[in-house]
Amino acid sequence: MNEEKLGNPAVVGLGGFGMTTLILQFHNLGWVGVGPVLWLGIIFGGSAQLIAGLLEFKTGNNFGFCAFTGYGAFWISLCFYLIFGTNAELIKAYPVLKLTGHGLGIFLLMWTFFTFILFIASMKHHSTLAWIFLTLLLGFIGLDFKELAGNKLLGTLAAWDLIVCALLAWYLMAVAVYAECGINLPVGKPWIKSKE
């Protein structure tokens, strides 16, 4: 009896993560307004990535389940924080919703810790995944300093670093998509080898 062939949820998760991370950095560098970030963040980087993470559960991939579901939730919560935290009428009625640099900084700091945990695990997979999570971790650290310490230079460096992160995510998406066509792209060896 043949098992039904399933698609790889990672292609959607990586696609959504890469695109939304890229458009946010375009915004952070002043190249585009916040509107495209919010729409892509809610729909592709948020909802589609969240669904991809939940589908990873069925494959038994705890790393993908945690990463895609987690970062899908990140994008949705960030977009809602930006939408509701900058709405003057809502803030007047509910001051607790107001978006502040300190509040955003603490929000990002929590995701920095989350990313650090996944970075450790990524080093056991392959180099491409490890580079994605290293650049993501460094990007979050730069954004933490931007929001909590007012360091705009580190915020700009973080944006460029996260552009690299987004492109690496798209590369890993291409690895999975192209493999089905018989095109095998390299991903590199794990940074931490398993004991035999």
Image: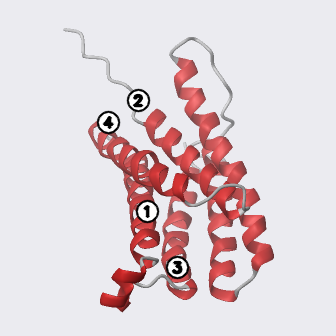
Q: Nearer the viewer, mark 2 or mark 3?
A: 3
Amino acid on which disc 1 is placed:
Phe
Q: Is residue 191 visible?
A: yes
Q: Is residue 35 left or right of residue 152?
A: left
Question: Sequence-wise, which precedes: disc 3 or disc 4?
Answer: 4
CA distance for labels 2 and 1: 22 Å
Amino acid on which disc 2 is placed:
Asn
> Which dot marks residue 45?
none
CA distance for labels 2 and 4: 9 Å
CA distance for labels 3 and 4: 34 Å
> Badge 1 local density, few (<14 within 10 Å), some, or many (20+)?
many
Question: Sequence-wise, which precedes: disc 2 or disc 1?
Answer: 2
The colour scheme used to paint the residues is secondary structure
CB of mark 4 within 8 Å of CB of mark 1? no
Q: Kindly identify which residue carries mark 3.
A: 104
Q: Nearer the viewer, mark 2 or mark 1?
A: 1
Q: Is residue 82 left or right of residue 137?
A: left
> Which dot marks residue 74?
1
Task: Identify the residue shown where x is 72% and y is 65%.
Answer: 158
Give the structural element (helix, strand or loop) at label 3. helix
Give the structural element (helix, strand or loop) at label 4. helix
